[in-house]
Image: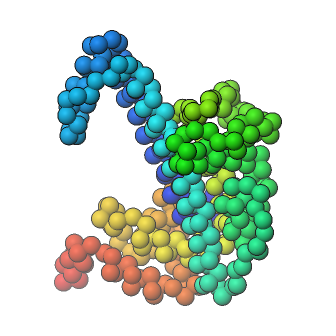
Amino acid sequence: MDVTRATAEPLYRFVKFHDVLNRRIKTSTAALVATKRSIGTGKRASQKLSKLIERSGEPWGTKNHWADPGLEIEDSAAFFAELAVVRVVSAFEDFAVSTIGEWNRWTARKGIASEQQVVAHPDDLSRTLAPCSRFGFDVATVGDLAPVYIFFHALRNCIVHRNGRPSGVLKDIHSEVTFLKAWKAFRARRRKSPPPPPPYDDERITVSPWQAIFFSGVCRVIATEVNAVFAKAVGEDGLIYLASRHSLSAVPISTISPFPRTPEGLMNRYLTSGRGIRPDSPTEVIGFLKKLEIWAEYRQAYEKLKPPVAHAVKRRLDG
């Protein structure tokens, strides 16, 4: 079984989040640009925008006129970018918590004590990923990205707690040489010219939609590094054991069509659907589940999940 590119469930979910965020930000930005172009400028622009708002399907009434509709649309793009930054921090923290949850689930199964050393955390990234030291992850391995994450985490705090006004901490990070080098280095890694970090004044730091996607990309790289250490620590047995749990609940069964005819078919469908695990044969997972002493349990759970139609077909075939 090839697990060299194994993607555990927490990383799989974060990557899905990143991809969806990427599409939605670009779609929203394009829609705002198209709206701005379609309404033009001046008094007529306000009237056209008001009509669009009235016809949006929400009960907002008819008094939606502003002096500068174009500026309102530009601010809306920045507003969506701010919300995206908050969502990225939330999704990344969920990834970290879920990954350590997977580790605890596996070590409990193996009867291994898993304890975390109590140490001081110098920054937000170290604090978020500290529990991952239980399976051998060292935050120093992503040290070149740490300043970028720390900056955006401070930005998230300004958005959530200061209505977007930059704090002293954020201003200090913004001017640090290590942060600026890290910002440019990540962009160079992607073979793209690095634009400057978000500008700010005393009242607001302005985030662009592109910068929100950029931050999510940074988190994705960090999450991938964490996942690689985690996958190596739990090994093939751990990955299959955890996959057996998620394959029974990761997606609504009604969305699986056609429904796999065998328990191992369900497992194989899960493993090869973005999880980066390739069994050498369709039945190889049976041997793993038997070795883990959960094959009978998995078969019973599979029978309970089979759609009614599948049972009816089986009865007709048996009859």
Specify whether 251 is left or right of 204: left
- Comparing 157 with 208, the one in front is 157
- The answer to whether any part of residue 43 appears in the image is yes
Q: Nearer the viewer, residue 255 or 313?
A: 255
Q: Quadrant of residue 263?
A: bottom left
Q: Position of residue 48 (x, y in %)?
A: 25, 20
Residue 234, percent from left and from top: 67, 73
Number of dots carrying numbers: 0
Specify the farthest residue to the front.
202
The residue located at (41%, 71%) in the rendering is 249
Q: Quadrant of the C terminus?
A: bottom left
Query: As drawn, which residue projects farthest toward the top?
Result: 42
Location of residue 8 with respect to 301 vertically, above or below? above
The quadrant of the rendering that contains the N terminus is: bottom right
- Nearest to the observer: residue 318 or residue 3: 3
Give residue 136's position: percent from left, percent from top: 75, 68
Is residue 71 shown above or below 20? Answer: above
The residue located at (40%, 34%) in the rendering is 28
Does 311 sit above or below residue 204? below
Viewer-closest of 155 and 301: 155
Q: Residue at x 24, y 78 (%)?
A: 311
- Position of residue 202 measured from the top left corner of the image (x, y, whole percent): 62, 32
**Which residue is drawn at the image coordinates 75% and 34% (left, top)?**
175
Residue 2 visible, this orientation: no
What is the quadrant of residue 138 in the picture? bottom right
